[in-house]
Image (cartoon, rainbow, N blue to C red):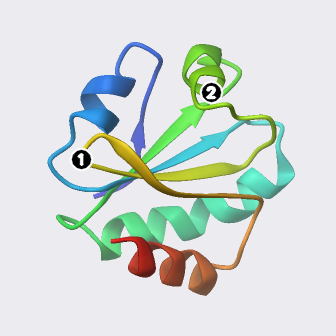
Amino acid sequence: MSTVAVTDDTFDAEVKNSDIPVVVDFWAEWCGPCKQIGPALEELASEYEGKIKVAKVDVDSNPNSAAAMGVRGIPALFIFKDGQVISNRAGAAPKAALQSWIDEAI
């Protein structure tokens, strides 16, 4: 499974009401570090298929979700489980660091 594009309108359905944990990536097209971690998140989405969902929220097109989460800088990553944030981090990181962060949280 690849990453899922989430909008302000689908945020609750895709993230908060998900049966499995969701990693949410708040990003923008113009953000260099966001582009850096994009491929790693795609790989993790495939490797964890059925265990987690990786959702991407474009902050330029969907400012309400970012504002509701208090996102001030991007990339901003959150892990939701049972509709609640259980972990978050900001900034780019190598795939191994993202993977260990996910493993610790779920």
Q: Look at 57% across and 70% down and name the residue there.
A: 40
Instruction: Identify the mark at residue 82; answer none if there is no mark.
Output: 1
The CA span between labels 2 and 1 is: 19 Å
Front-lying residue, 32 or 85:
85
Query: Which residue is pictured at 14% across the width and 48% down the height?
Result: 19
Drawn side of residue 50 relative to residue 21, left or right = left
The spot of residue 14 in percent (x, y) is 29, 33
**Residue drawn where x is 32% and y is 25% of the image:** 12
Image spot of residue 97 (x, y percent): 62, 82
Query: Which amino acid lies under the numbered mark 1 shown in the image of this protein?
Result: Asp
In the picture, residue 26 is in which quadrant?
top right
Q: Position of residue 2 (x, y in %)?
A: 36, 55
| Quarter that holds the N terminus | bottom left
Dot 1: element: loop
The structure residue drawn at horizontal position 51% and vertical position 41%, both measured from the top left corner, is 56
Q: Quadrant of the C terminus?
A: bottom left
Identify the image quadrant of residue 31. top right
